[in-house]
Image (tube, rainbow, N blue to C red):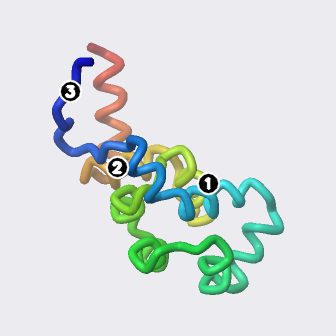
Amino acid sequence: MNQLGPIPGNILFDGPMATKGYPLNKMCYSFNKADARAAFLADEEAYYDTFGLTEDQKVAVRNRDVIAMLEAGGSIYYLAKFAGILGLNVQDVGGLQTGMSTDEFKAFLVKQGEI
């Protein structure tokens, strides 16, 4: 089996990270339902406990720190559900992940399409 080294600037989401992030990802998946989004917004702390988030995951969500959520095992596919509650779109999250503003990230994507 060929193992690739780390990709700079990326947080590897593998089996151990999936296990670590299970509570956070399960909570984010629940946001597919409007009543779950309303329950989260009504009492975030109780909602964290419903899914058994770790303290690191709770802090990341409280701080709206997408990078810390990824480091705590969050899958970008599930975190996108949470980002929607925050009014963020995929380009906003891409900018956060790369250290760019949303506009810089959009321009970067356009430039990549020209290559």
Crowd rating for badge 2 (residues with CA inside 10 Å; few <14, some 14–19, many 20+):
some
Q: Front-most of 70 and 96? A: 70
Q: Is residue 38 above or below residue 11?
A: below
Image quadrant assignment for residue 8: top left
Of callouts 1 and 2, which one flags the residue occurring earlier in the amino acid sequence? 1
Report x, y in % for residue 63: 42, 77
Residue sitting nearer the eye, 77 or 51: 51
Classed neighbour count for the residue bearing mark 1: other residues with Cα under 10 Å, few (<14), some (14–19), many (≥20): many
Q: Quadrant of residue 56?
A: bottom left
Q: Looking at the picture, how far across and down is residue 61, in whole percent? A: 48, 72
Q: Which of the two labelled residues, at mark 3 and mark 1, occupies the earlier sequence position?
A: 3
Report the residue at 39% width, 62% height from top. 72
Separation (CA) of disc 1 from disc 2: 17 Å
* Lower position in the chain sequence, tag 3 or tag 2: 3
Task: Name the residue beneath numbered marker 1.
Answer: 81
- The quadrant of the rendering that contains the N terminus is top left
Position of residue 19 measured from the top left corner of the image (x, y, whole percent)? 47, 53
Vertical comparison of 5 with 100: above or below = above
Which of label 1 and label 2 is nearer to you?
1
Residue under numbered circle 3: 4
Q: Is residue 43 left or right of residue 75?
A: right
Residue annotated with mark 2: 95
- SS at mark 3 in the image: loop
Q: Where in the figure is residue 18, as x and y percent of width and height?
A: 46, 49
Q: Amino acid at mark 2?
A: Gly
Single out the mark in the foreground, 3 or 2.
3
- Badge 3: residue crowd in 10 Å (few <14, some 14–19, many ≥20): few
**Is 69 positioned to the left or the right of 51 in the image?**
left
**Rendering quarter of residue 40:** bottom right
